[in-house]
Image (cartoon, rainbow, N blue to C red):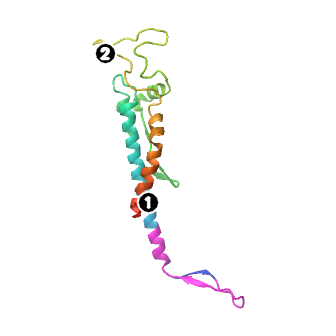
């Protein structure tokens, strides 16, 4: 279908022209946009999984493993011109997850309270305090991987369009 970009005005010396094939151009752009969104979503989800794995292996305070077991990365959500990949910890342990995330002593107490009182152990002698990990256990790996997320995203987009 031809579309007139601007009309020719008689007697003004203005030149008008028509563009043909706009339906194909629009279709190609829409297809490219859809492929770009899907590629970006996959890339961001992959980055979320990498961050979550690093968090669970190296940062989450572990006493019983219950908190570490609540880590999740949601599938990408599309809306209002953005792609959101939610990740976090919690579920039923959400109040504990937030408390530990914001506690500078998380994973560092060695079984002793700030007042010098030893924490109890289980009936079998296992510690009830975290022996591994630290506070800001999701924030730190997000900051650590920030540049990698961007590089992966741009690389995946370049590969999509044959520039990688």
Residue 91 spot, x, y in % from top left: 40, 33
Sequence-first disc among 1 and 2: 1
- Asked whether 1 falls inside the magenta stretch, the response is no
Q: Secondary structure at mark 1?
A: helix
Label 2: few (<14), some or many (≥20) within 10 Å? few
Residue 87 spot, x, y in % from top left: 43, 40
Task: Indicate which disc residue 126 carries.
Answer: 2
Q: Residue at x 43, y 17 (%)?
A: 109
Disc 1 and disc 2: Cα gap in Å? 50 Å
Q: Is residue 105 above or below residue 80?
A: above
- The reply to whether discs 1 and 2 touch (Cβ–Cβ < 8 Å) is no
Residue carrying label 1: 36
Residue 102 spot, x, y in % from top left: 50, 26
Q: Is residue 83 above or below residue 162?
A: above
What stretch of residues is rendered in magenta?
7-29
Pick the quarter of the image with the C terminus: bottom left
Q: Is residue 163 above or below residue 128?
A: below
Quarter of the image holding residue 36?
A: bottom left
Label 1: few (<14), some or many (≥20) within 10 Å? some
Q: Residue furthest bottom?
A: 11
Residue 3 spot, x, y in % from top left: 55, 80
Q: Is residue 84 visible?
A: no
Q: Is residue 53 visible?
A: yes
Q: Residue at x 64, y 86 (%)?
A: 15
Q: Judge left or right: residue 49 versus residue 6.
A: left
- Asked whether 22 falls inside the magenta stretch, the response is yes
Task: Indicate which disc residue 141 carries.
Answer: none
């Amino acid at each position: 279908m031809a579309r007139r970009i601007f009309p020719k005005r008689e007697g003004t010396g203005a030149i008008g022209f028509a563009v043909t094939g706009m339906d194909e151009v629009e279709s190609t752009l829409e297809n490219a946009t859809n492929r770009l969104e899907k590629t970006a979503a996959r890339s961001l989800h992959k980055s979320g999984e990498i961050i979550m794995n690093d968090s669970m292996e190296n940062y989450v305070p572990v006493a019983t493993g219950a908190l570490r077991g609540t880590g999740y990365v949601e599938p990408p959500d599309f809306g209002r011109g953005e792609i959101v990949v939610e990740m976090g910890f919690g579920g039923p342990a959400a109040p504990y997850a937030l408390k530990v995330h914001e506690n500078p002593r998380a994973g560092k107490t060695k079984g002793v309270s700030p007042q010098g009182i030893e924490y109890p152990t289980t009936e079998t002698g296992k510690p009830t305090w975290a022996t591994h990990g630290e506070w800001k256990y999701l924030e730190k790996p997000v900051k650590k991987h920030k540049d990698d997320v961007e590089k992966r995203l741009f690389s995946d987009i370049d590969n999509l369009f044959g520039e990688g």
